[in-house]
């Protein structure tokens, strides 16, 4: 197979260190990357849960205030104080989740390179690896289990996208609420909400694109697929 390492291992040609020691060093780094990935994914779930908790608490508080004030000026004032806090937490969550995804890209990149080193030591083991041992972008995506067809669906169903979608709704509600508080008509309220949501979509899209581009610019492939 053209993607197997069949040449004499460059690692084995170096003197002074045995292959067993090299394998131990590589395995130590591999376990370190796995532990780091585990911690970052735990943070993903914690951040998302914290945001949902804040959002749920805000919705419950708004419902109680709405019952007490009959959706009067007091309710609008309370909503204008609470919703920006929810949105702030949501924006911070999206930014952090984007950073975690970029970090995870590098952990997978590192593990691909380590598998390449393993196969330099023992090229006959190549058929037993189900993840890639090259570090170009397509090979990294293959290690994630992603191909061109699945990539879009995984992105749309990802935690950052779902949190971003909730933030877009919050932006729309906040925009409509501000317009209503200013005394606008119902039509203007709806248009203001839609406009705020569209601005949020553009903003989160630009943020995601910037995060992806920064990750791409930050690495150089050492072992591209032949």
Image (spheres, rainbow, N blue to C red):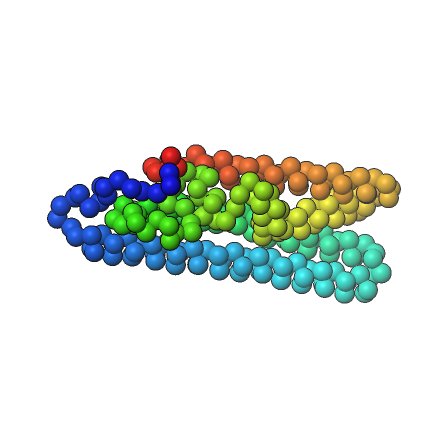
**Quadrant of the rendered structure where residue 109 is?**
top left
Return the residue nearer the eye: 36 or 133. 133
Q: Residue at x 12, y 48 (%)?
A: 16
Lateral position of residue 90 relative to residue 66, left or right: left
* Residue drawn where x is 53% and y is 50% of the image: 97
Q: Position of residue 24 (x, y in %)?
A: 25, 57
Residue 130, visible in the rendered structure: yes
The number of numbered badges drawn on the structure is: 0
Tell me if 157 is positioned left or right of 8 in this view. Answer: right
* Residue 189 pos. (x, y %): 81, 43
Q: Is residue 182 visible?
A: no
Q: Position of residue 208 (x, y in %)?
A: 56, 40
Q: What residue appears at the point 68 percent right and 38 percent down from the top-left corner?
A: 199
Residue with the most extreme front position: 1
What residue sits 56% from the left and 43% below the top?
151
Camera-side residue: 201 or 41? 41
For the N terminus, the image quarter is top left
Residue 96: % across, % down: 51, 49
Q: Is residue 134 above or below residue 128?
A: above
| Quadrant that contains the C terminus | top left
Q: Residue furthest left?
A: 16
């Amino acid at each position: 197979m053209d993607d197997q390492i069949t040449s004499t291992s460059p690692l084995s040609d170096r003197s002074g260190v045995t292959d067993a020691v090299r394998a131990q060093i590589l395995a130590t780094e591999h376990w370190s990357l796995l532990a780091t990935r585990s911690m970052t994914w735990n943070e993903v779930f914690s951040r998302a849960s914290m945001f949902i908790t804040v959002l749920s608490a805000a919705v419950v508080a708004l419902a109680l205030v709405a019952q007490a004030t009959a959706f009067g000026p007091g309710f609008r004032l309370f909503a204008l104080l609470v919703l920006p806090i929810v949105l702030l937490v949501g924006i911070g969550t999206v930014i952090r989740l984007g950073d975690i995804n970029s970090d995870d890209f590098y952990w997978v990149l590192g593990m691909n390179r380590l598998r390449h080193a393993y196969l330099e030591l023992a090229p006959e083991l190549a058929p037993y690896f189900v993840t890639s041992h090259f570090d170009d972008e397509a090979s990294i995506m293959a290690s994630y289990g992603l191909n061109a067809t699945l990539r879009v669906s995984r992105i749309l169903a990802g935690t950052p996208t779902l949190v971003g979608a909730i933030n877009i709704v919050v932006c729309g509600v906040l925009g409509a609420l501000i317009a209503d508080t200013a005394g606008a008509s119902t039509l203007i309220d709806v248009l203001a909400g839609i406009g705020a949501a569209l601005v949020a979509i553009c903003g989160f899209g630009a943020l995601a694109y910037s995060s992806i581009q920064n990750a791409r610019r930050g690495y150089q492939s050492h072992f591209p697929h032949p």
